[in-house]
Amino acid sequence: MKKSILTLVVVFAVIVSCSYEKSSVTGWNYNDKKNGDFQKMPYVEQETGPNLVLIEGGTFVMGRVVDDVMGTWNNIPRRVTVSSFYMDETEISNFHWLEYLYWVRRVWAEDYPGVYAKAKPDTLVWRSRLAYNEPFVDYYLRHPAYRDYPVVGVSWKQATEFAKWRTDRVNEQILIREGLYNHNPNQIADDNFTTDAYLNNQYEGDKRQDGLPWDGPNSPGYRSVKMEDGILLPDYRLPTEAEWEYAAYGLIGNTLGENIIEGRQWPWNGHSVRNPEPEFMGEMLANFKRGRGDNMGVAGKLNDNAEITAPVYSYWPNDYGLYNMAGNVSEWVMDVYRPLSFEDMDDFRPFRGNVFKKKLVDEDGILAEKDTLGRIQEVNIEPEDAIDRRNYRRADNINYRDGDFQSQINDGGNDHWETYKKEKGQRTEGDETMGVYQYETVTEGGITKEQSSMINDRSRVYKGASWNDRAYWMSPGTRRYLDEEYSTATIGFRCAMDRVGSPVGLGGQY
């Protein structure tokens, strides 16, 4: 059984009390209360969070490896490198989402009912004008028969909020496991655990112990856990498009030395969507639509045993141990969509969608109080925050170098300030304001709404095929997009997490 980190700290303190490790740059002792007790905590490697598997990174050809039958030319092949990271072995299920809803309702519904309302999936996505899908509207999310099926009807924004919530619950559980906190089911409104609030000393909670032993200057003998201790996990988040595509191929199973001995069209070897192994000959390898009017096959021999989605542990995992990376539901990723993303982005950890932020502080540099939901407040960086920077000049880099006026003119010098202050996507020539991405407010039938082009800064990429897609979309290189606030009956998601330290896991040398 794994010993708790707190136990390791105590054992470590006993050991070093006899023989201190010294700094290689100053010669001062670590963990010595005589000289201030600067601590070097015992650390092996990053703990693997619930439901995650390590995806060892590397290089691969991102983009089209099959014919572009849609004629979109939006996935031009390019070699890139992806760092090691963690990814959920399954899609997030209905029951996972119900756990989330239960917590949100328990903590926020009384004071902020709108938070709970925004967290609920749109079950009406199942409706069709010329089909009888009402049973899915009524039962798919909440009936126990579907509890292990992937959640759908969630927007990109909802999926992102779920990942934030999950980060806090996992790290809270770690602190409880280590004996530092008690379970507290009575958290409400802004008095709930968030990782950022804890690390910034804005959360007290129901402590079981005052903290980790520490004999630093003016110390009461304990301190809170810090990021430097390696106890808390990095944030859960959506995977980037490059990460998702890399993980879906699972090429780690086809490497010999430094060579990939066989490329892949699907997350498995070969050109067929059926299992070639003698004992499973002919069985479908994923949940997809085989042809017009064929969602499940013939009674007595259903081709994929699912007319809509299937349980998240269905079919065979790929060589990383990931289930349903082809079929079942398409999946949200972090990226903002642009047709030429692969040409524009870096070839190391490629991603479009960066909006750089900072913690909100007052005029004296003191961190602002938590918001009404108990979260540390963040704001976009200001131009003056990047006045001497060479690697970025502004907060919102979503449309950087993608053809708009603002991202091409004056982005390398201080003259960009006035351009930055104008509304994103617009430029002024004389008295005329000209939009690059066309956003406008229109009124139809007494309803006022914002209208824009289909490709804009809210267009998010989703990857892979769903239960209602043909086999073409199961190739990991394919890509589609949808507004970040929209949802469908065919899009779900899974989470990812950064891997810190060695890219190869326990025992790695670098």
Image: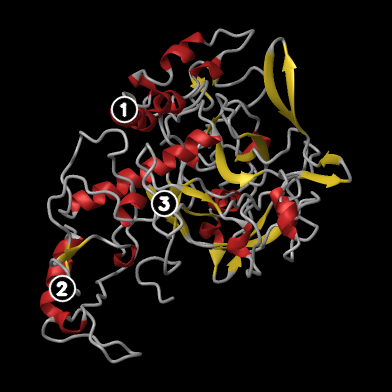
Residue 90 seen anywhere in this rendered image of the structure: no
> Which of disc 1 and disc 3 is earlier in sequence?
1
Q: Where 303 falls versus 456 (above or below)?
A: above
Residue 451 is left or right of residue 187, and the answer is: right
Farthest residue in the right direction?
Answer: 430
Residue 35 seen anywhere in this rendered image of the structure: yes
Q: Nearer the viewer, residue 141 or 103?
A: 103
What is the distance, in whole Å, between disc 1 and disc 2 at their CAs?
41 Å
> Which of disc 2 and disc 3 is earlier in sequence?
2
Label 2 crowd bin: few (<14), some (14–19), many (20+), radius 10 Å: many
Q: Position of residue 121 (x, y in %)?
A: 47, 24
Rendered image quadrant of residue 13: bottom left
Residue 360's label in the rendered image is none
Label 1 crowd bin: few (<14), some (14–19), many (20+), radius 10 Å: few
Q: Which residue position holds label 3?
A: 235
Kind of residue sitting beneath label 1: Tyr
Kind of residue sitting beneath label 3: Asp
| SS of the residue under disc 1 | helix
Kind of residue sitting beneath label 2: Asp
Q: Position of residue 286 (x, y in %)?
A: 53, 35
Q: Nearer the viewer, residue 166 or 282?
A: 166
Query: How many labels sit on residues?
Result: 3
Q: Which residue position holds label 2?
A: 215
What is the distance, in whole Å, between disc 3 and disc 1 at their CAs?
21 Å
Measuring 51% from the left and 15% from the top, which residue is drawn there? 299
Measuring 15% from the left and 84% from the top, which residue is drawn there? 34
Label 3 crowd bin: few (<14), some (14–19), many (20+), radius 10 Å: some
Rendered image quadrant of residue 294: top right
Residue 222 is left or right of residue 334, and the answer is: left
Residue 268 is left or right of residue 316, and the answer is: right
Q: Which residue position holds label 1?
A: 102
